[in-house]
Amino acid sequence: MSVFDDYSNAEWILDELNSARCLVVGMAPRDIRSILRTEAKVATIHELVVWDSRVVDALLEAITPGDARFRTAFDDSRVYCPACGGSLNAFADGFAFPHGLRQHLSGSGNAARCRVVHHAREVARFRLFSHGVL
């Protein structure tokens, strides 16, 4: 017998996963968290797509390359991700601003998507799922 044989166990697992995702989003800096936690307004799949795009735009607007919290040590044209604090890779400090950071935040091009933004989107998607939209 699997834990997935019982619907209540599967539901519990989904709730726990969503709680873990909320914790990940909650570890972002306060001003960034306020951008990521606007998913309550999402009521349709179309609104989820629009919300996702607006979150990326808002995160880009929330910082400037000169912002000491996100600026890399060696180059003012590169910034660390405001949500995860990450960098392109071990050989590149931060992301080119704004294009490289946009790719990271949205997962476009062949860039790996920011895990914090990914989890914020999944929280919004879970909300749709739990309301029977998906």
Image: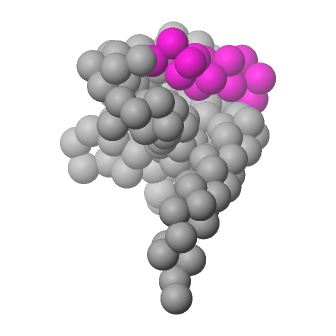
* Image quadrant where residue 53 sits: top left
Q: Nearer the viewer, residue 6 or 33?
A: 6
Identify the residue at image location x=48%, y=75%. Answer: 5
Q: Which region shows up in magenta?
A: 29-42
Q: Nearer the viewer, residue 70 or 82?
A: 82
Left or right: residue 105 versus residue 116 is: left
Identify the residue at image location x=37%, y=51%. Answer: 112
Above or below for 104 versus 53: below
Q: How is the image coloured?
A: one colour
Give residue 128's position: percent from left, percent from top: 43, 31
Give residue 120's position: percent from left, percent from top: 54, 35
Left or right: residue 17 versus residue 110 is: right
Identify the residue at image location x=45%, y=49%. Answer: 88
The outermost residue toward the bottom is 1
Identify the residue at image location x=60%, y=66%. Answer: 9
Above or below for 47 versus 131: above
Q: Is residue 98 visible?
A: no
**Is residue 39 shown in magenta?**
yes
* Image quadrant where residue 47 sits: top left
Q: Is residue 113 visible?
A: yes
Above or below for 75 versus 38: below
Could you tell me what secondary structure mostly forms the magenta stretch?
helix
**Is residue 88 shown in magenta?**
no
The outermost residue toward the left is 109
Left or right: residue 37 versus residue 51 is: right
Give residue 134's position: percent from left, percent from top: 33, 37
